[in-house]
């Protein structure tokens, strides 16, 4: 079974964020390309977590307080023997609080990826070049000039936003349907986040070839299921608070290894 899954790439794709550690161990000079991005991630991460988690936790607390008051007012009109529902509601409220906080952590980690990859792009680009040359023995770059290069980077971010917003609206509407709609929206949300993460971490070698956005997206889909497991593991690694300050550079490097092995 394991051999079959590995043959399709499902297991192999998930291992790339860890394979790159062996490459760094054998090639210590590569660490010089991640030192500055890690420092930048620490600064950006502290700002994001301090801001979003503070206001997010405050919002969750207000929401839970409102829900508790509403339930208390509802229970007062019920027979006394139904007072046990109060304990049930307390348990549900804490479960909702936990789910909301987990969602907030995932969202914060997702934002950290966007800012971290964008700010660390010069260093990540050099790291990716070194890895590709080390892995394949050659380096392919299409030069377009600094102005066009900046324009492409801005367009790439805008197109990702359009993709996320377009699919996100559909998923939000599906979430209004009870039962199956919520399940489909949850799975779709994870798939969308995984796709965006794949685009981010595979972008360095793809952008060196100046591929259009749709071609980058097609490469992600053509690499399934390896790209799905790769993106899912990376999404998990960058969603863990504090750990993601270190794993973002590793995921960027593993994206280049994935490209060299499974796309080239």
Image (cartoon, rainbow, N blue to C red):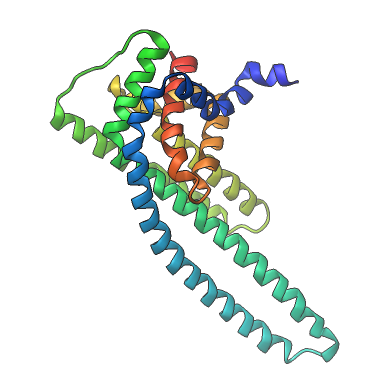
Residue at 50 percent of width and 58 percent of height: 104
Total numbered labels placed on residues in the image: 0
Quarter-of-image position of residue 114: top left
Residue at 26 percent of width and 35 percent of height: 153
Residue 110 position within the rendered picture, expressed as x and y whole percent measured from the top left: 45, 47
Residue at 29 percent of width and 22 percent of height: 208
Looking at this rendering, what residue extends furthest in the top direction?
137
Q: Front-most of 63 and 135?
A: 135
Up the image or down, 152 lies above or below 102; here it is above
Q: Is residue 66 left or right of residue 38?
A: right
Residue 113 appears in the figure: yes
Q: Is residue 46 left or right of residue 20?
A: left
Up the image or down, 114 lies above or below 230; here it is below
Residue 129 position within the rendered picture, expressed as x and y whole percent measured from the top left: 32, 20
Looking at this rendering, what residue extends furthest in the right direction?
81
Residue at 40 percent of width and 43 percent of height: 113
Residue 117 position within the rendered picture, expressed as x and y whole percent measured from the top left: 35, 39
Q: Front-most of 264 and 244?
A: 244
Q: Quadrant of the C terminus?
A: top left
Quarter-of-image position of residue 1: top right
Up the image or down, 103 lies above or below 119; here it is below
Q: Is residue 144 left or right of residue 13?
A: left
Residue 205 appears in the figure: no
Q: Front-most of 223 and 132?
A: 132
Residue 244 position within the rendered picture, expressed as x and y whole percent measured from the top left: 47, 44
């Amino acid at each position: 079974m394991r051999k079959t899954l590995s043959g399709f790439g499902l297991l192999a794709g998930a291992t790339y964020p860890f394979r790159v550690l062996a490459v760094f161990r054998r090639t210590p000079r590569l660490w010089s390309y991640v030192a500055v991005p890690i420092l930048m991630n620490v600064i950006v991460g502290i700002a994001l977590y301090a801001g979003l988690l503070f206001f997010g936790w405050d919002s969750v607390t207000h929401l839970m307080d409102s829900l508790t008051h509403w339930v208390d007012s509802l229970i007062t009109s019920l027979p006394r023997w139904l007072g046990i529902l109060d304990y049930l509601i307390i348990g549900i409220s804490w479960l909702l609080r936990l789910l909301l906080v987990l969602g907030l952590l995932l969202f914060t980690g997702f934002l950290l990826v966007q800012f971290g990859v964008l700010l660390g792009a010069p260093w990540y680009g050099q790291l990716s070049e070194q890895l590709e040359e080390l892995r394949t023995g050659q380096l392919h770059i299409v030069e377009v000039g600094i102005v066009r290069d900046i324009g492409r980077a801005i367009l790439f971010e805008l197109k990702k936003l359009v993709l996320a917003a377009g699919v996100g609206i559909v998923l939000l509407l599906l979430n209004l349907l009870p039962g199956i709609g919520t399940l489909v929206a949850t799975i779709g949300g994870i798939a969308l986040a995984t796709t965006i993460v794949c685009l981010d971490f595979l972008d360095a070698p793809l952008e060196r070839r100046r591929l259009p956005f749709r071609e980058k997206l097609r490469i992600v889909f053509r690499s399934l299921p390896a790209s799905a497991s790769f993106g899912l593991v990376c999404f998990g690694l960058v969603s863990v608070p504090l750990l993601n300050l270190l794993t973002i550079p590793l995921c960027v490097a593993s994206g280049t290894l994935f490209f060299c092995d499974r796309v080239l």
